[in-house]
Every structure is written in C-alpha cells, then in structure tokens.
Image (cartoon, rainbow, N blue to C red):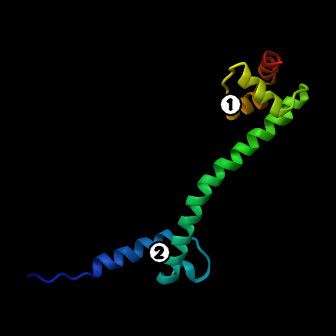
Amino acid sequence: MTRVKRGVAASKRRKNLLKDAKGYRWNRKNLYREAKQAVIKAGSYAYRDRRTKKRSARALWITRLNIASRIFGVKYSDLVAKMKAKNIELDRKVLSQIAVENPPVFEKIIAAVK
C-alpha cells in the first residue's frame, strides 16, 4: 500500500477555520484551538438568532399595526378579529407595510372592517 502524507489536508483545514475566525478579538483569531471554539460558538449563535430575528420582526409588525389602527379608533386585537370574521386574509407583514407606506389604503381596509 502506498504511503499517504496528510499534512496538506490538515493545514488546509486549519487555514480555512482561521479564515472563518478572521476579525475575532485576542487569541481567537490566530490560535487554532481557540479559533475553533469561537467559530463553533458563533455558528450556534447565528443559527439561534436567525429564528429570533423572525420573532422580533413579527413583534415590530404588530406594534406598527396597533399604533396605526388606534389612529383610526380600532384596537389591534379588534382589527385582527374583525378581519378574520370578514375573511380578509392579509398577513401582519403586508398590513404593517401598507400602514407605514400607504395610509389612505390602510384607512380603506379599516373602513371595510368596521
């Protein structure tokens, strides 16, 4: 069987991991063991916060809708309940965009709900 020298693969793996740790502070950017831990931790934070971002975006839409609907004399919870009763199927993201960017159209939606 032929001999396999593995130095190239190992150094490539370490080089790529240190490239991922570029911009980190202190020893985490240039020492392999600490960089490896930092990259793993950063990846878990990134995975977690991609989901958290969706939650906070929905909370923002609801807050915007509540403010915009109260201007026209309707509470957010009443707005959503009446829309569901009248089969108006606009999600919160689209509604909040309409409320922010096009208030006259949002006023028509509220009039249709009332």
Q: CA distance from mark 2 to mark 1?
A: 42 Å
- Discs 2/1, front: 1
Question: From where the camera sits, is residue 16 visible?
Answer: yes
Residue 83 appears left or right of 114: left
Secondary structure found at label 1: helix
Mark 2 or 1, nearer chain start: 2
* Residue count near mark 1 (Cα–Cα under 10 Å), binned few <14, some 14–19, many ≥20: few
x and y percentages locating residue 23 in the rendered image: 58, 71
Q: Say which residue appears at 62% left-offset and 77% top-offset.
A: 25
The three-letter amino acid code for the residue at tag 1 is: Val
Residue occupied by mark 1? 94
Q: Residue furthest left?
A: 1
87 shown above or below 14:
above
User: Mark on residue 65?
Assistant: none
Question: From where the camera sits, is residue 31 visible?
Answer: no
Q: Say which residue appears at 10% left-offset and 81% top-offset.
A: 2
In terms of image quadrants, where is residue 87?
top right
Q: Nearer the viewer, residue 88 or 16?
A: 88
Indicate the quadrant containing the N terminus: top left, top right, bottom left or bottom right.
bottom left
62 shown above or below 2:
above
Residue occupied by mark 2? 18
Residue 17 appears left or right of 88: left
